[in-house]
Image (tube, rainbow, N blue to C red):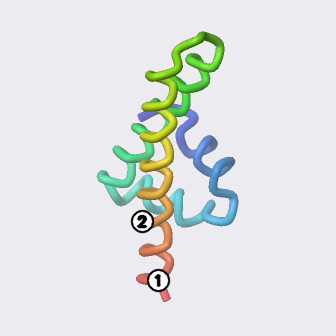
Amino acid sequence: MYPDLHLELMSDFPDSKERIRKLLQADETFTEIAEDYLFCKTELEKLSLKKSGDLKMKYSETLEDLKEELLSRLKENEINNY
């Protein structure tokens, strides 16, 4: 796991800090999606320094898909805890 994974996620999803902490500890699939999200975000930041239009666009699309999946899982966890 990325050492700063929870910090990155809490920064990107500040309203879900407690759910992020719990899911990273208990849900392997959530952790894998979160790692993919952070990897994609990092690669996109690197590509922003270069002129890599197609690849940059693909990473942007993938990042958005991963973000939507994380938000869905966070919302599902919120509903299940009430």
Tell me the crowding category of disc 1: few under 14, some 14 to 19, or many 20 or more residues within 10 angstroms, Cα based. few
- Badge 1 element: helix
On the picture, is 35 further left or further right than 5? left
Q: Position of residue 75 (x, y in %)?
A: 49, 73
Q: Dot 2 corresponds to which residue?
A: 73
From the viewer's perspective, is residue 79 above or below residue 62? below
Residue at screen point 57% across, 35% down: 4
Q: Position of residue 48 (x, y in %)?
A: 63, 20
Q: Position of residue 42 (x, y in %)?
A: 55, 26
Q: Position of residue 69 (x, y in %)?
A: 41, 57
Asked if disc 1 and disc 2 are in contact, CB closer than 8 Å, the reply is no
Name the residue at the top extreme.
50
From the viewer's perspective, is residue 70 above or below residue 62? below
Q: Dot 1 corresponds to which residue?
A: 79
- Sequence order check: which comes first, mark 1 or mark 2? 2
Q: Front-most of 75 and 22? A: 75
Total residue callouts = 2
Residue at screen point 30% across, 53% down: 29
Name the residue at the front extreme.
53
Quarter occupied by the N terminus: top left
- Badge 2 element: helix
Say what amino acid the circle numbered 2 marks: Arg
Tell me the crowding category of disc 2: few under 14, some 14 to 19, or many 20 or more residues within 10 angstroms, Cα based. some
Name the residue at the bottom extreme.
82
Residue at screen point 51% across, 23% down: 43
Say what amino acid the circle numbered 1 marks: Ile
Q: Quadrant of residue 8?
A: top right
